Amino acid sequence: MSVLHFLSAGAAQGLLKALQPAFEAAHGVTLQGRFGAVGAMKEALLAGEPCDLFVSTDAMVTELSSQGRLDGGTRAALGRVRTGVAVRAGDSRPDVSTPESLRAALRAASGIYFPDPLRATAGIHFVQVLRELGIHDELLPRFRTFPNGATAMRELAAAGGPGLIGCTQVTEILYTAGVEWVAMLPPRFELATVYAAAVAAGSPQAAPALRLVQLMTSDEAASLRQQGGFE
């Protein structure tokens, strides 16, 4: 069985994993790859890591297509993903509906879990939010950062102690067992990111990779996208 390699932003992990078994059986391929922060996935592609399918922000897919790294003609949007707040399953849910209540909730937290503040879309944005709220430096000792949102949420779920909170894209919250989505960030701080998929330029598995792009963005998979947090 041939291998179809992918590099994908963590936001699409739930969708891709849900489609994987049926797709592999139908097309006689094995999906093999990894999920991570969008910056890390770009670095992997540019470094020559095997890749037939690339999933990232629409802006990054467009950029890499213009550079000839991806086949722009295969690009298709998965939908929009917003960024939200999470707590461990069963923990009390703080009010984060306004900048003031979000500030209070974060200041009350004993640990704050979020993805890479340099390479992950949600992590970069969340650090900006903390700075705008004027609490970044105060809360720095409580930061618990991880390579991507999925890992941050798994670590939040496994952590002990009271008063823990997390922030990442809602897709990564919804498919992580042991954490619960509280709410989106307040409107002032809303981050809505459009994600897209495309076939890598020169891919030896271009045909099945394109079929997978088409499946991920199809009406057939619409309910899976919605369940996973894509709008």
Image (cartoon, helix red, strand yellow):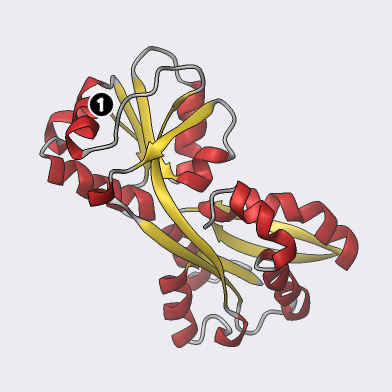
Residue reaching furthest to the left = 134
**Label 1 Cα neighbours within 10 Å, binned few <14 / some 14-19 / many ≥20:** some
* SS for callout 1: helix
Residue at (56, 53) in percent of width and height: 35
- Residue 87 lies, in percent from the top left, at 42, 26
Q: Quadrant of residue 34?
A: bottom right
Q: Examine the rendering and report whether any part of residue 205 can be seen.
A: yes
Q: Which residue in the protein does label 1 denote?
A: 105
**Observer-nearest of 90 and 70:** 90
From this view, report whether residue 201 is shown above or below residue 158.
below
From this view, report whether residue 76 is shown above or below residue 67.
above
- Residue 206 lies, in percent from the top left, at 72, 79
**On the rendered structure, is 17 left or right of 122?**
right
Residue at (41, 61) in percent of width and height: 193
Q: Quadrant of residue 141?
A: top left
From this view, report whether residue 166 is shown above or below residue 164.
below
Residue reaching furthest to the top = 161
Q: How many marks?
A: 1
**On the rendered structure, is 214 left or right of 90?**
right
Q: Quadrant of the N terminus?
A: bottom right
Q: Quadrant of residue 211?
A: bottom right
Q: Examine the rendering and report whether any part of residue 140 can be seen.
A: no
From this view, report whether residue 190 is shown above or below residue 70.
above
- Residue 139 lies, in percent from the top left, at 19, 30
Q: What amino acid type is highlighted by mark number 1?
A: Ala
- Residue 222 lies, in percent from the top left, at 67, 59
**Observer-nearest of 195 and 47:** 195
